Image (cartoon, helix red, strand yellow):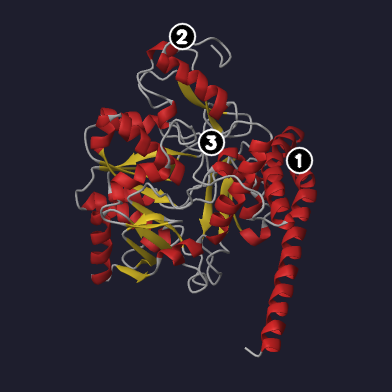
Amino acid sequence: MTKNQQIPDNSLASEVTKLLETVIDGGYCIGCGACTAINGSPLKMQLDEYGKLQATIDPLVDPGLVSNSVQSVCPFSNESLNEDQISQPLFSNECKYHDKIGYNLATYAGYVLENDFRDRGSSGGMGTWLVSNLLSQGLVDGVIHVHQRHPSESDPRLFSYQLSTTIEQVQNGAKSRYYPVEMSEVIQLIRERPGHYAIVGIPCFIKAVRLLMRQDQLLAERIKFCVALICGHLKSMRFAEMFAWQSGIAPGNLLAIDFRKKLPDADANRYGVEVTGVQEDGQIVTHVKSVRDLYGTDWGLGFFKYKACDYCDDVVGETADVTVGDAWLPQYIQDSKGTNVVVARHPIIYEMIERGMSGRQLKLDRISADEVSQSQKSGFQHRREGLAYRLHLTDLQGQWRPEKRVQPKAKHLNSTLKERQHLRVALAAESHLAFKDAVDAGKFSVFQQRLDSLVQGYQKLYQKEALWRRGARKIKYLLLNLLGT
């Protein structure tokens, strides 16, 4: 069966058709696997030709056997609840509400002092410390998070969701993974294995988990804590391959990657990328390069971005019990060891953090919700003001797109900022196509040549904007002097 074949005429089976015709055919599938995790789902997760995980029809499953709504668990379906609707009943009694970071009980910036949590993490080590404590204190029996895996011919992926039941296993799953993963296998594991669990994921994945929990009472009973990682956007497999190829490891020969290798005496945002793989001569090698020396590392370019990410308005995982991210603030960024921002929403998490601070396990500053949002300023600009314009453009074209809390509009952006949005969409789309052509040609230069004109145009826009800002500041200064203030 393909997605164009007829699906049996019953209400749940017809929902599969609707999901195919909107989210999946429209390119808004984020590859989380929530729709495939429903009992009897006729969908399965599969890597597409561009290295993205996508939902597709499983020809071996009868669509008439689906037991629950596939649309209501999809984070990009218009039939699912939005982040405010999910988080309000969970957190409103204990927490304050902030228009950017959602409900929050307390907000912090800092890092872990004890053991080597900070050294082993991408940033301050807070994410691993939190789930390790949930496990060691008996609040959960296991942690569901992303680990490295050994690629094979049948499954070339370098990472997957796995279960950790020991502190050592949890620590082995530390670090950021800019890579496609899906949750259907571990969701089924939770159903089959009695116990209590914490699950870690990017915002849209945690949203999907919450939606699954609303539909499946067993999951609601067993998943006790949801931990979100602040997300810029999700990448395809090709992001990792792009780095490896620049180090002499061709696509298909990459064995392992560390996207956030800390470099001594460098600012926290000037980290390295470590790749291990097979060279042309058959030797297994490991290379480390600074992001400053690699093509395509500017996050604003959006290389290999999923289309869905441009239609997301949740930067900080508003539906999670706690959120952890990088403290991209001036007072922290120069520390090469890394510093986290933390948004606590669950009272147990809050108390755990406070005890950690008083016991000198944690070095945290209490910061404001505004400071947390400022630490992710670029992400909020792109997914609030920028998203409003992208929604406007999609509506002008008469195309289906997900309903968002942000309303479509265009007049709030000047021509430079509008052009930036056009270029970001073009860069993301072209990166997928150009890399496939480069692999087919066996030349990385094909990829770079195809993207260079777009990249240069994008960089000129930033230069133009910087000149405009300097001019505006000078005019303001002159006016203040003329007015004598």
Q: Mark 3 Cα within 10 Å, few/some/many (few <14, many 20+)?
A: some
Taking the view exactly as shown, the residue that stands out farthest to the front is 483
Q: CA distance from mark 3 to mark 1?
A: 37 Å
Type of the residue with mark 1:
Lys
**Front-most of 223 and 240?**
223
Viewer-nearest residue: 230 or 123: 230
Which label's residue is closer to the chain start, 1 or 2? 2
Q: Earlier in the sequence, mark 3 or mark 1?
A: 3
Q: Residue at (27%, 47%) from the top-left corner?
A: 166
- Circle 2 — which element? loop
Q: Which residue is mark 3?
A: 402
Q: Which label's residue is closer to the chain start, 2 or 3?
A: 2
Toward the left, the furthest residue is: 138
Query: Callout 1: 10 Å neighbours few (<14), some, many (20+)?
Result: some
> Is 123 on the left-hand or right-hand side of 257?
left
Helix, strand or loop for disc 3 = loop
- Point out the image quarter for the C terminus: bottom right
Disc assigned to residue 8: 2
Q: Is any atom of residue 286 visible in this view?
A: yes
Residue bearing mark 1: 443
Residue type beneath disc 2: Pro
Residue 112 lies left or right of residue 15; in this view the side is left
Compared with 14, 78 (above or below) is below
